[in-house]
Structures are given as C-alpha cells and as structure tokens.
Amino acid sequence: MNVAVLSQQDPYNRKTFSGTSYSLSKQLEKHFNVCWINPNNRVTGLLSRYFNRTKKGRFILNQNPLWVSKLISKNFNRLLNKNKIDVVFNIGMAGPFTAYKNKAKIITFADASMKQMIEYHYDIKESDAQAITLNEAMEKTTFELSDVIITTSQWCSDSIINDYSINPKKIELVPVGANIQIDPEYKSPPEKNTIHLLFVGIDPVGKGLAIAAEAVAKLNELDQSKAYILDVVGLSSAEGIAGEHIKFHGFLNKNITEEEKQLKDFYRNSDLFILPTRLDTIGIVFLEASSYGLPILTCDTGGVPEYVINNETGYLLPLSASGADFAKKALELLNDPIKYTQISRRAVELIKTKYNWDVWGERVAEIIKNLY
C-alpha cells in the first residue's frame, strides 16, 4: 500500500514538529511504502512566501487567499495520481483539500483544532478576522473529507467533535511517544547537595520560564542546605531572567548526534523536570522526561493532562500557580523518597506500555489497513 505523508516541511528533519513528523513517518515505513509529498510547486511556493512574508511568530495562520490554496490543491491531486497513492497521511494541512478530487483515503493527524489554537495562542489571536474565518472553513472541509482523524489527546478530540460537528466515529485517539531513542530508565531519589531542575523549551513566555526561575529562587530561599539549579535547554538567554542559579545551555539539535547526546545527558542527570507551560497541545518534552523517570511539574492546560498524569507521573498545577507554588510542590516531592520513586517508576512503565511510537505505529497501521 502506498502512503503519502502530506507535510509542508520535511518530515525527516527532526526539528520539524519537535521530531514528531520524523517519528510517525518512520513508523509508517515499517508497514507501508511511504513517500513525502509537499503540495507546493515552484509557483505556489513563491506565492505562499509572498502572502506570508510579513507574518511573525512561531504559530501563524496560513495567509494565502483561497485561489492560491486551490492552486496548491490541484497540484496536490496531480502528485497523488503520479505516485499512485492509496492513503494520504495529513500532518495538519488544510489548504491542499480545498479542491480535492482523488480516490485516495485521507487520515488527518491533529494535536489541536484551529478553533482551539485561535483561542489558545497569543500569536494567532492577533491574526486578522478574514484569515481566521478562511482557515477555520478549510479545516472543517479537511475534517469532513477525512476518513479517519487521529488525535493526540481527548482535549483535541472534543474540540473536533463539538466545534466542527464531526462524527465521533471518525476520531481515533492514539497517544504519541518520545522523540528520542533510549531505553527507559528509573530514577532514584536524589541524595546530593545540588539539585538540578530541567526546563526544555524555546518559547520563554509560552513555556513559563519566569515562573520556573521564580520557583528555583524560592527553593534556594526555603532550603539553604542545598543548591537548586535551573538548567534551561533551548535558549541561550531570556529577557529579565538571570541569576547564579540559572544556567542557559542553548538549543540542542536532535539532527546532530553530539547535541542529541547532550540533551539525553540533561534528562539523565536532572532531578526534576519543570515546565509551567501556558500552552501545549502535546508537550513531547514531557514524554522525553518520563522516559528518564523524571518527575514532572507543569500546568493543567491543553493536551498536557493526556501525557502528565497528576499524582502518578508528576503534578499538574493550575495556570494561576506561582513560582512559590511550584517550589512548595518540588520540596514536598523531594522530601518524600517513596513518592519520588513511585512517580519515576510509573512514568517509565507508561512509556514502555502506552506512550511510545511502536505502540502508536501498530495501532495506526491497523487503522489504515481497515480502510480497505
């Protein structure tokens, strides 16, 4: 069976979608003949760059007018026929389906709906109303055309059902896995004078770096018998964030073997994972932390509760929680070695049995085979 991975960015680049596109593509390759299709040709690529040229921010809406999306869709149909594609595995694209005319089955992979992201993300809230309306309409068309919609969380599934009136029978919730290759390992409660808290993220505002920094400052104030260090991976600096207990280590690229090894070492050598995120649809870093048995301190938001089980693999604090609240919870856990061990072991257990790409691959392969 020929399966096309539909993605505007190269899915085999491990920087794309935090490595999720790479992991799912490699899983699909175990069961099917897989190729990557970028629906743009030279002309539509130039047009897309032109219409999106002034937009800033990591999360932006597609600014293409409808006629450009239809040109992209027509080129997409041509590529599907040329490659004799049986199934399209769509990673979050909507434009290519505005003029879709093909017999290939469609599976759409979604970690959040456009409706959720418009309400959820500060960059998208600033988009113009016309772009929002068009993007929502294109996404609804894509959901309606899809034979199956694979989601990453109940949070996402609920929005697709309730906000887009999609039949729940179309939706399959299949949890994803960590995007680093390791043998999961437990952690023992730390018995040392320096405690390392790990923060991994490239968006200091969206991931709550200021709250994490406040938490570490409070820990050093409350417990002066130890030194508490915040290791920040993903950033070289952040405005207003500094201090002797905060160490910035820059961005580590998983495509580079040595940098991936450094990232693994941070997970392995840390004692707690802290990410007071304001917005996360999945939070792959939580799965990476759990792979190393790291107890997690984060916020109850978006798709996070699907992957951080409160009181089992970490703690979900409310979005209103302060750095002092995070510090209190960290001390509570560090002073309870039995609970620390339980959380570490439960995290690794779930990585082995539920939150891993092999489990995802087997389930998705079954879904695809059942289409024919």
Image (cartoon, rainbow, N blue to C red):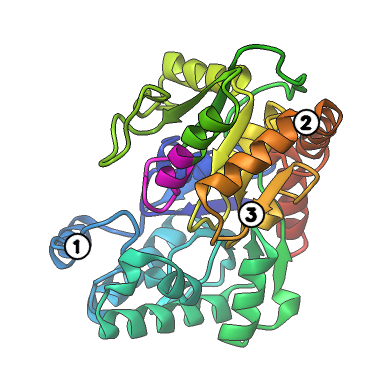
Query: For the residue carrying disc 3, how many other residues have a C-alpha within 10 Å: few (<14), some (14-19), or many (20+)?
Result: some
**Looking at the image, which is closer to me, 190 or 62?**
190
Q: Circle 3 is placed at which residue position?
A: 317
Q: What's the distance in space between the residues labelled 2 and 1, CA to CA?
A: 42 Å
Q: Is residue 120 magenta?
A: no
SS at mark 2 in the image:
helix
Observer-side mark, 2 or 1, equals 2
Residue at 56% from the left image edge and 38% from the top image edge: 274
Q: Where is residue 166, by image quadrant? A: bottom right
Q: Are marks 1 and 3 in contact (CB under 8 Å)?
A: no
Residue 308 rendering spot, x and y as whole percentages? 69, 48
Type of amino acid at the residue the image marks with label 2: Ser
Amino acid type, mark 1: Lys
Specify whether residue 174 is in view. yes
Task: Give the quarter of the image for residue 108.
Answer: bottom right
- Dot 2 or dot 1: first in sequence order is 1
Name the mark nearer the viewer: 1 or 3: 3
Amino acid at the residue labelled 3: Leu
Quarter of the image for the C terminus: give it.
bottom right
Of mark 1 and mark 3, the one earlier in the sequence is 1
Tell me the magenta residue range: 201-214
Q: Which residue is mark 1?
A: 55
Residue bearing the label numbered 2: 344
Q: Which residue shows up at 28% across the image and 85% down it? A: 129
Mark 1: few/some/many CA within 10 Å (<14, 14-19, 20+) = some
Residue 32, located in which quarter of the rendered image? top right
Residue drawn at x 50%, y 73% is 116
Specify whether 201 is left or right of 160: left
Q: Position of residue 74 (x, y in %)?
A: 33, 71
